[in-house]
Each structure stands twice: as C-alpha cells, then as structure tokens.
Amino acid sequence: MREVAIVSAGMTPFGELWQHSLKDLFVEAALEALRRAEADTVDAVYVGNMSGGQFVGQEHLGPLLADHLGLRGVPITRVESACASGGVALRSAFLEVASGMSDLVLAAGVEKMNDGGDVTNVLATAADQEAEVYHGITFPGLYAMIARAHMATHGTTLEDLAAVSVKNHRHGALNPKAQFRQEVTLEQVMASSLVADPLRLLHCSPVSDGAAAVLLCPLERASEFTDRPVEIRASGLATSSMALAERRDPAFLDAVSLSASRAYHMAGLGPADIDVAEVHDCFSIAEICVLEALCFAERGRGGEAARTGETALGGRLPVNPSGGLKSKGHPVGATGIAQVIEIFEQLRGEAGERQVKDAAVGLTQNMGGSGGSSVVHIFERG
Amino acid sequence: MAGIVGYGAFIPRNRIKAEEIARQWGKDPAAIRRGLMLEEKSVPGLDEDTITISVEAGRAALERAGIDPRLVGALYIGSESHPYAVKPSGTVVAEALGLGPDLHVADFEFACKAGTEAMFVALSLVESGRVQYAMGIGADTSQGAPNDALEYSASAGGAAYLFGTQHVLVQVVETYSYTTDTPDFWRREGEFYPRHTGRFTGEPAYFKHVTAATRAILERTGLKPADFRYAVFHMPNGKFPLSVGVDLGFTKKQLETGWIVSTMGNTYSGSSPTGLAAILDVADPDDLILITSFGSGAGSDSFVLRATEHLPERRGRAPTVRSMLDGRRRYLTYGQYATYRGKILLNE
Amino acid sequence: MPSPRYRREVPARYRLEAGRCAGCGAVVYPARRICPACRGERFEPMTLSRRGTVVTSTVIHVAPAEFQMEAPYAMAVIETPEGGRLMVQVADCDPNDVAPGMEVALEFRRIRKEGKGGILCYGHKAVPARQGPAGRRDA
C-alpha cells in the first residue's frame, strides 16, 4: 500500500444554517478544499451522510452532489455508518489512494438536520429498531444507561460528566466555526434540564447543519498541493453488538477499543505517542468511556481526565481542542471529517488560539450509534 | 361434568379516589362515597387495555390449570372496550397465551355481561364435546363521561375462566340466561362515552333482569339462597348488588367476599367475573356459589357453581384478587387520570 | 409499523421466544440464525422466563413523539434467570426508583399506537416484582 497524505481541507461553520440546503453545504466545504489545493478535479469522492433520505427526503446523494460540485462523471460513493459516516468515508478514501486505484480523492461529510424532520426518530434509526427503539428508547437514553452503568461500577460522578462539557465549551469558544462559542460553567451544566437521567441538556451534543471535506493524495505527490502535508499513518474500524442490552458490560465501548488497537498496530504507535486527539463526545459520558477504550486513561478512571485538566488545552493530552461535538456541533455525517480537519490544522501549526504546542502525532475517533461502530485514524506531521 | 379447570384475574395498579373526582366537579365527596358506596376505582395505564388485562388474567388461568395451551380449542373475550372496532382482541390474546393456531376465536359484546357470555359459550363448547378446553374472558377499560355519575365507577380489570372436563376445580351445576330489548345504557359507533337513562337503569333494567335470571336458576336447580356459601352479582356501584342480593334472600355474609366494587369500581364485563375470582380464591370444597351478571340492553347470565376438592391445591399458583386490590397501588390526581383515559384533547 | 414486520416479530414480542445455542449454550433473544458468541447455527427453541433483574436503566424525559404522554418513563436492560437480555420500559412504579439489582416481572402491555388509525403494537414491560408468603405470587 502507498503512503497517503491529506493536503487540503474545507469546512462550513456548524450550526442552524437555515439559508443553506444539504447541497449548498457540501459544495461550500468541498469547493474550499479543492480551491485551497488549487486542484481542478478529483479522481473520486467519498461522502459520509447518515440520513439524507429521512432528514431531507434525498437518497442517491452521490450523483446529486457530484453534479452540484461541477464534477459530473466523477465516481462518488455515499458512505453510511450513522455518526461514524464521516470517519468511514475518510477510511474508504484512504484505501482508494493507498491501493493505487486513485491519486486525488476527496473525503467529505455532510448533514442537514434542521429542515423539519423528526430528529429524535431519525437519530434513533442508529439504534436497534426491533430490540430498542420499539420500546421507546432515545439516543440520549442509551448513553444515559451507559452513564449510569459507569457511575455504578466505577464511581464516576455527575461533576465528572459536567467537566467534559465545560472543557469542550472552553475550547469551542476559541473555534470560529463552532456552533456554540460561549463557555459554560459547571453549575449551568448541572442545572440544565433533564433529557434522560442522568444526562442533562448541556451533556448532549446539539442538532446541527454542516459539511466538511479533506483532499487526499499519495504522499509522494503531496508537494504539488501543499508544503505542509499530514500523513495518514493508520486506519482502524471495528463493530460491536448493536443492542446495548447484549453487551456484557454496558460501560465499556469494545468497538472503540478494537478499532484503536487496530490503528495503533498499523501505525506501530501507542497511546503515549499521541499529542492531540479528537474523540466522539456525542454525550459527555462518551468522551469518558472513549478515553478508557483508547487507553488514554485506565479502565474506570476516564472521569478524572477532564476534571483534573489533563485533557484540556495546556494539559498532558488535549482532547477535543476544536470544542468537540458538544460545542463545535454534530452534523452527523460531517463530524468524522471535521475531527480530521482539526488534527490536520493542529499538525500544520495552523490552529491559532487552539494550537497544541509541537503537536506531531494526532488521533481521531468517530463512533456510530451507542458504540456499534468505531473508526480510529492516526496522523503524523509530514 | 364440565367446569372451571383454571381461573385468573388482573386489576391494574393505578387508582383514583372517588373524593378526588368529586372535588374536580365541585361535588360533596362524602355524599358521593355514601350514595354510591364507592371509595376508589382502578384506572388503566396508558399502556393497558382490554387485551393486556385479558392476557395477564389468561396467563393466571393457564397456570392454575397446568395444561398445555395448545390443547385449548376456543377463546372468547367479552368486553365493551375492545381496542379495535374491527379486528378481534382474541387473536392478540391467543398468540400471547401460546394458544392455537388450531383455535376458534371470537369477541363478544353485551355491555357489562360480555364476560359471562364468553364463559357461557366456552362452557357449552366443552360440554358438547367439540373442544377439550375453552376459555372465556371478561375484561374492560370502559369510560365514564366527565362530570357524570358513571365517572366514579367506570374502572378497569378482568378475569379469565378455562373450562374443561378433567381435574375440574369448580363444577358448573346449571346456567340460565334472560334477555329483553331494554335500552337503558348504550354507546353508538364513534361516540367516546356511553349514555345512560338515569333511574331507568335501576328497577326496569338491572333489578328486573338480575332478579329474573336468579329466580329462574334457583327454580331449575331446586336450590334456596340459604344453600349457597357465596353469591356475587354484577356491580355497577356499591349499592345495587347488595340491594338485589338482599331482596333475593341472600345475607350480607354471603355477599361480602364477591363484593369488591368499593375499591375496584365497575369493570363492566369484568365485574362479576372478577368478583367470582375473589370468591374462588377462598372457597372451600363443596361450597355452592351463585353468580349473576347484568348487561345493559339488556340481559343477565346466571351460573350455579360448586367448588371441588381440587380448588385449594391449585389456586396458590397465581395472584389473588385481594392481593391485587390491597397490594401495591398508585393514586392519581384527576389530571393524571384524565390524561390516562384520553379525556384531554390532543392533535394526533 | 408495517404489518408484515409486526407479524414476524409476534413470537419474540408476545411469547418471549428465544433460542439456546446448541454449541455454546448462549441464550439469544430475539432468536436469530447465527450465534453471536460462537457463530453456530443450531439452536434449541426456548422462551424467556417472565421475570428478571435490572442491569442498568435510565429515565427518559425527552421522549419520541409517540411516547410523549408517557414521559418521564424508566427504561432498563433486564437479564432473565436463563441469561437472556432485553431492553424494556419499567412501569407501575416511580421511574426514579428503578436501580440495578431490582427484581422485576415482565407483563404484557401495549407498547405503541400508530396514531388514531394504525395498528396497536404489544409487547412486554417490566414491573416491580414481589413474592408473597409460602412462595405464592402476590401482585
């Protein structure tokens, strides 16, 4: 397999973008990535999107988006893995370049959630319809059960959960593209309204519109497009049981653990080698569980990380310097690519006020549903 | 001789007190409780209906009978609150109980006596030899209109009776049915609440039919009220069943075990069948039991039953009616009650 | 809820029909073709007991449209004595009282309605269990 680099990126702001359709969002992000690389066309496109059909009534996104990008004829594949759609789109693009099949491949993600669809029900399609959704579960409900299991087994507290939201908002306040650019206090998080006990409104990532795109090419050609490429060192994808009830320990995300060990193995690196990470904090408890599954924290001790400042900018291992899903926003299909863009900018020293000093190796972790799928990528400064 | 080989009952755990309803409408709570002889009634949850009540009652009946459900040849559900207008409750209940598919199923309606009708037909099918076992269930979640007398009594619950010829717990000695066209209480298609004719529902309806059926069955069997250990009548409120019982020559002592209405309310098709279950929970072998139902429209079914020596050994297999009435329950405010009973207008 | 799908799911929903893997003994509910533990394809049919223990739970405050009138309601992962696992609502108690280790019974309930004119969908919910004296089950 060839070595692959990311040479350019483009991203819309994330938020309630009433003036923009799904097509508009995709074109804006994709065009920015292409223009920055001064790339005229691409060999292929992969676009992550969870639910164009249910949110805006549009399936068959491939030809529609290629057409509106002015690239009729280009092969384009729509990738779906619920909230991990973006990460899996990146993996697919990576494999197409690494295999030698194509040279210039765009990996994008887009979601338009605010056009009036029943968001709760659409998101619930990422859960097990027969076993879970039928009985009245919601997405926050699944993570709430995970939170309660983690709290009962490991003593994680409500303050530990709130500390994750506080940290990520502090980071997001420094991100011009974030949906929420104001900080929140621990007290505000703890007093926000209950969504699914113990998760409150400010423990939950928002409903967002947005798109993001990165341009991949073989490392040997990267200098044609940028003098600061970022190499993709590894990609690891794994799945776990869909129904939360079937996991022996609901507090442990085994798909995350497996996808991470695959990525570490492929890169020949370990958790200690990572300087900065973007992980899937769809709910604050998710960040806590993911830290443990990525081996950034010991099993059961993920709750301490945000509370002690270890994972804040300036801490030992900054996690979610972009603001994470919580503050930056979570347009489902776009999130995985947005995580990659943050690491891309960090490793190029272009992250401005959010810059992690001397960041050389970064990691992204993107997860679908209640942890049914997880994809981890490791990146290195070129 | 054919008889009851298994029985079971189910009463939802939510309650509302008569005084809470009275306060809602500005009526004197004490006068209501005294006049109707009602303290509280059962309320179905948003997730309960005639089908769910029938399933739990039917499960208890099968547990007491201890037979393979696939031997049941017929299932009849009597109710005036079947969840569908067209599609039987019986098919859902049958699948949930593990009956069939070699099975005859029908839903019955005859206001408050659809339960005993279902029992009568199930019994007769077994007596004819056409099926080995047949189950008849009476269950309801009927509505009482807001600010109407029936709102204090209309409640939810039901009982199931499995009939067979082997290992009979309660023999059926005799049955009798009495029917006329008397429009005392009815509900037209599409109406949400039933309508009733006030005092006309008393003497010309309830009392006439209950009395006629009971006197006829006593004559047929040559029995007198004093021969019975227990008697239970349809319970539209607390007063009527005591009144008709005493008029017919029964004592308060014979009536009290089956008289569960003051804390259960009127479960319509489940009323006298659940009262009967309360009796079977404590009856001794050889006790004679009388049950007469009443359904508006109007008619009464009467049964003379005799407990056998098998009854005490089997009844411990499922919950008693008293444990459901006196056990864990939850009192609702009128607002919660109105929400559960769909009395609050919503956009669908 | 499409009727063909509803019909297929009746054995699992109404009767808790499950499968015990003939190879490794794992209990699979609802039944499926390939054992998730050992990938075996031979199962013995069985049904889950109508009781179990709470593994973890939550209280849903912001509910899907169809369940809004019932909110807040508790949901729990239940493990049955034979090792089957299922996720159900917990009814007939204060939702905040549901905790790991709580003993429950599984009762037949109406799970959802499809608006004013659609089909009614049934299944089971957990309710707090209680044992009476001398092993007799009280309600």
Image: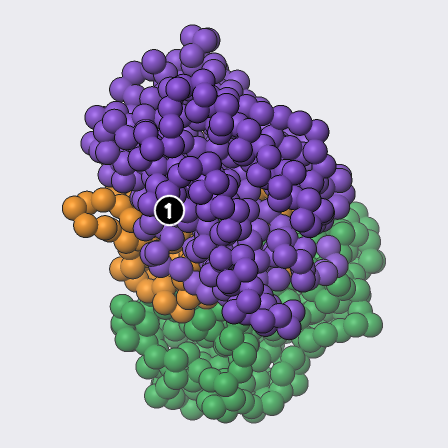
Chain colours: A green, B purple, C orange
Q: Quadrant of residue B298?
A: top right
* Residue marked by disc 1: B252
The reply to whether residue B45 is visible in this rendering is no
x, y (%) of residue B186? Answer: 70, 40
- In the image as oriented, which residue stretches furthest toward the left? C134
Which residue sits at x=43%, y=73%? Answer: A198
Instruction: Left or right? Give the position of A24 relative to B218.
Output: right
Provide the secondary structure element on which disc 1 rests: helix
- Categorize mark 1 by other alpha carbons within 10 Å: few (<14), some (14-19), many (20+): some
x, y (%) of residue C69? Answer: 60, 61
Instruction: Left or right? Give the position of B43 relative to C105.
Output: right
For the residue pair B167 and A2, the one nearer the viewer reads as B167
For the residue pair A147 and A171, the one nearer the viewer reads as A147
Q: In the rendered picture of this protein, how many numbered marks are placed on residues?
A: 1
x, y (%) of residue A130? Answer: 51, 44
Instruction: Left or right? Give the position of B63 relative to B141.
Output: left
Which residue sits at x=45%, y=71%? Answer: A197
- In the image as oriented, which residue stretches furthest toward the top? B129
Which residue sits at x=47%, y=15%? Answer: B124
Instruction: Left or right? Give the position of A374 relative to B172.
Output: right
